[in-house]
Every structure is written in structure tokens, then in C-alpha cells.
Image: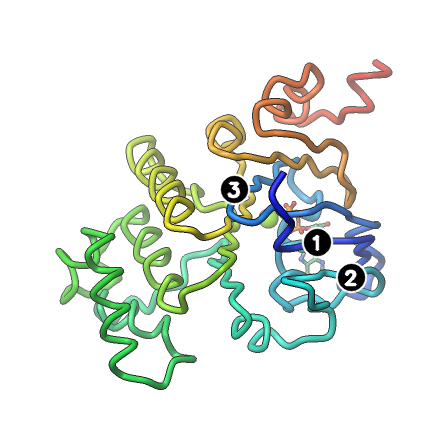
Amino acid sequence: MPEAVLSIDGVVAGYGGGDVLKGVTFDVPAGGVTCIVGPNGSGKSTLLKAVSGLVRPRLGSITFQGENLVGRSPRQILERGIVQVPQNHSLFREMTVRQNVELGAYLVRDKRVIAERYERVAAAFPIVSERAGDKAGALSGGQQRLVEFARCLMLDPTLVVLDEPSMGLDPKTLRQMFQTVRRMNEAGRTILLVEQNARQALRLADQGVVMENGRVRLQGSGHEVLHHPEIGALYLGGSIEETVTG
Ligand SMILES: Nc1ncnc2c1ncn2[C@@H]1O[C@H](COP(=O)(O)OP(=O)(O)O)[C@@H](O)[C@H]1O
Ligand SMILES: [Mg+2]
């Protein structure tokens, strides 16, 4: 196993009305794809928000490249190289694709650096170069998702955090989206993603983490999690416990 770039250790967090995360611990190996799966409401998005600084854990630590992120602001976390693509579409519909992508570099002051990164991202994402001048709102949901990926790369992140990137995509765009995740990973980014399309995502993942009710229920290689005998029930809405005892 490569060294962990991110270590989540005993994280307890919520929104004021009780704990949603009840002690979450796992490592994200550097350079790999880690995929979190689990039923709705199990705390997957809350965990990603804790990593990005949008939710502050009550207990535990989140260590990125040796530094505890707990208590850091979302901006400070962004500056350290963790970029999250949110669950809902987040492009400015009335702005062009190019403007949206360039906005991704808002922490970068140097115009030359922004221009270089834009060229690199546009070369890697045909949708960006082909539709640069079109309003983002004119693109399909899947195309917008790819532009969101392109935008997040403008900060040259070490860790890319994706919350259900396949949501609302048709099967063809879905494949394209997963290929793009793979390419971002091959380009050296560590990926932490949450996916409802568990089978496809786990096939792509080096590591799989199953969350249920604010806890890690299972962790292993993507292959191990995918072929775990009790896992199917989770995607049918049951719990591991129900499967084991019932
Ligand atoms: N902003 C919020 N305020 C209060 N409760 C929330 C908020 N967001 C999520 N929750 C609650 O936290 C729990 C876990 O939600 P979430 O992390 O979104 O789960 P998942 O992403 O696995 O579906 C749910 O019970 C949900 O209702
Ligand atoms: Mg969620």
C-alpha cells in the first residue's frame, strides 16, 4: 500500500442535531482512487464536507500530508490542494464554458499560470476546447459535469473529492465520466469519490469503503468490496446486519 495522503481518524461530526458521523477512520492512499459507497443518509456527503472544511468535526482528526485539517477554513484546505466537486451542478449557466473553467483558478494570481493551466485543461477536455465560447447552461448535464472536473483541475489539486459525479447522467456520459476520473487519476491526482453507481465505481477503485449509519462497515480493495457476499443487500436498501441476522 502506498503511503496515505489523507488519514481520517475517529471523526465524529454532525450539524447540531446529533452526530451524523460516529467515528469514521480510514486512510486514503496517495495516488489511488478511493470510492465510498453506502445507502442514502449514511453520512458520505457529510464526510466529504468534513474533508473540505465545510463541516467541522467535533472529535477526531483529518490529516493531509502530515497536517491536521480540523479547524482549517474551506479556503485554507483548498490552498493546500484539496478540491471538491459538489454533488449538485455548480457552473454559472450564463457564463461561458471558458469563463467557468478560468474561475476555477480564483486562488491563483499569476495570469500566465492561469493561461497555461487553461491550455492544459482544454487540451485534456475536448468539451472545454470545443464549447469554450458557449454558455455553460447550454450544455447537457453530463457535459457540465466534465466542465466541472476541468474547472477543479485549474487549482492543480493533489486530492480531488467527487460527490456522486454520475448523478443524473445517461449511460453513455456515465462511461465518459468514469473514464475522465481514471484519466485524472493517471495524471497523478489522488481521487476520493462517493458513488451510487457502486459497481462501476468499485471496478475503477483501488480501495472501497462501505459506510453505513455514520460508520465504516467494510473496507478493502475495490475488488474485495465489489465481491463481498453481504454487499449486494446494501444496494438494495438493506443493511449488512439485516443480511447477517435475517
Ligand atoms: N445540512 C444539514 N443539516 C442537517 N442535517 C443534515 C444536513 N445534511 C445532511 N444532514 C443529515 O445527515 C445525515 C447524512 O447525510 P449525508 O451525509 O448527506 O448522507 P449521504 O451522502 O450518505 O446520503 C442524514 O440524516 C441527513 O439528513
Ligand atoms: Mg450524499
Please tell me how many numbered marks the rendered image carries: 3
Q: Which residue is mark 1?
A: 7
> Mark 2, residues whose alpha carbon is within 10 Å: few (<14), some, or many (≥20)?
many
> Tag 3 or tag 1, which sits nearer the N-term?
1
Q: Residue 243, percent across and down?
A: 78, 17
Q: Residue at x 53, y 46 (%)?
A: 193
Q: Is residue 46 left or right of residue 201?
A: right
Q: Residue at x 57, y 39 (%)?
A: 35
Q: Which residue is mark 3?
A: 33
Examine the image and state in which quarter residue 97 appears: bottom left
For the residue labelled by badge 2, is the local secondary structure a helix, a strand or a loop?
A: strand
CA gap, disc 1 to disc 3?
14 Å
Under mark 1, the amino acid is Ser
Q: Which mark is residue 61?
A: 2
Q: Is residue 70 left or right of residue 200?
A: right
CA gap, disc 1 to disc 2?
8 Å
Under mark 2, the amino acid is Ser
Q: Residue at x 29, y 32 (%)?
A: 172
Q: Residue 17, percent across and down?
A: 82, 61
Is mark 1 in CB contact (under 8 Å) with mark 2?
yes
Under mark 3, the amino acid is Val
